[in-house]
Image (tube, rainbow, N blue to C red):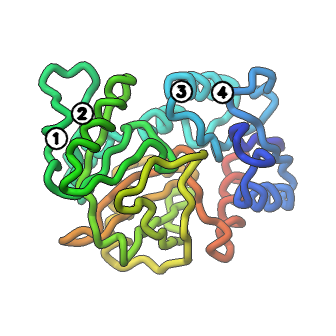
Amino acid sequence: MRIALATCREVPGLLDDEGRLLEDRLRARGVEAEPAVWDDADVAWSAFDLVLVRSTWDYPTRHREFLAWADAVERVSALHNPASVLAWTTDKHYLLELAGTGLPVVPSAVLEPGSDDTDPAAHPYVGVEHVVKPCVSAGSKDTLRCGPGESGRSAAHVRALLDAGRPVLVQPYLAAVDEVGETAVVAIDGAPSHAVRKGALLASGGGLVEGLFAPEDISAREPSPAETAVAAHVLEHLATPMLYARIDLLPGPEGPQVLEVELAEPSLFLEHAPGAADRLADAVVRRLR
């Protein structure tokens, strides 16, 4: 059995520590696993029994190209997660869908390029601390935290994204994250596996992230009953069990709120939970068989 761990050129050695850990666990199960750069035209994806999307973190500015790649791979190999799932999860418009089902989602407004009635200076969260990001983004790239008095800075960033043809997501900043942190609940094959605490990523007055992603402060965490329940409701909404999923939750005024549902290329923090890498490797083997 041979699988590809899809990655990008910018990752040193093509795999991060988590990717190497998973590679080791797969090989221990008789699976030949190797990194393959997703946009490398010389890769023969049909030679792999399964393609596992991992560190493809450079896709946001080439979203259509990435989705076309996923469709092409799925025609010749098993792709996880599937191409249709990658299309859904890589565009944060899905937060509006989740909110419409009654799930507790961080309040979100979307500004579309070319909309006649979109004034970047008059989005719903001007006057409160808020976050501006592209609807297609990863690793906190092109994401800006703006204070209540920074409407000009906020509007300039919104306008720059819209002018580049990128829909914009604007959300109020939930300040409790600065102390409590963010909870990331990881599921493997549709079942909760483990969780971690992520320290706040966006500093007040900070600029845009350089490099592939923002540095993260990660530690193991036992999710609260409320966080476990919200994550379970999100997994139920997905209907089909995904090989891997990560539900990121922020502490809201009335309980945990969904910040993101990561089904494409999320770090799964396997090294922070005993047995997690083995659980994922076992799930991959089940899919192969």
What residue sits 77% from the left and 45% below the top?
14
Q: Give how far apart the Cα atoms at labels 4 and 3 are.
A: 17 Å
| Tag 1–tag 2 contact (CB < 8 Å) | yes
Please tell me which of labels 2 and 4 falls first in the chain. 4
Q: Give how far apart the Cα atoms at labels 1 and 4 are.
A: 39 Å
Q: Is residue 104 above or below residue 55?
A: below
How would you rate the neighbour count of disc 2 (Cα within 10 Å): few for under 14, some for 14-19, many for 20 or more? many
Give the amino acid type for the residue marked by disc 1 in the picture: His
| Tag 1–tag 4 contact (CB < 8 Å) | no
Please tell me which of labels 1 and 4 falls first in the chain. 4
Which residue position is annotated with label 1? 123
Please tell me which of labels 3 and 1 falls first in the chain. 3
Q: Is residue 248 above or below residue 273?
A: above
Which residue position is annotated with label 3? 62
Q: Give how far apart the Cα atoms at labels 1 and 2 are.
A: 8 Å
Q: Give how far apart the Cα atoms at labels 2 and 3 are.
A: 20 Å
| Tag 2–tag 4 contact (CB < 8 Å) | no
Point out which mark residue 73 bears: 4
Give the amino acid type for the residue marked by disc 2 in the picture: Leu
Q: Secondary structure at mark 4?
A: helix
What residue sits 25% from the left and 51% below the top?
171
The image position of residue 249, as x and y in percent, is 37, 64
The image position of residue 244, as x and y in percent, is 56, 54
Point out which mark residue 111 bears: 2
Q: Is residue 264 left or right of residue 91?
A: right
Q: Give how far apart the Cα atoms at labels 2 and 4 are.
A: 32 Å
Q: Secondary structure at mark 2?
A: strand
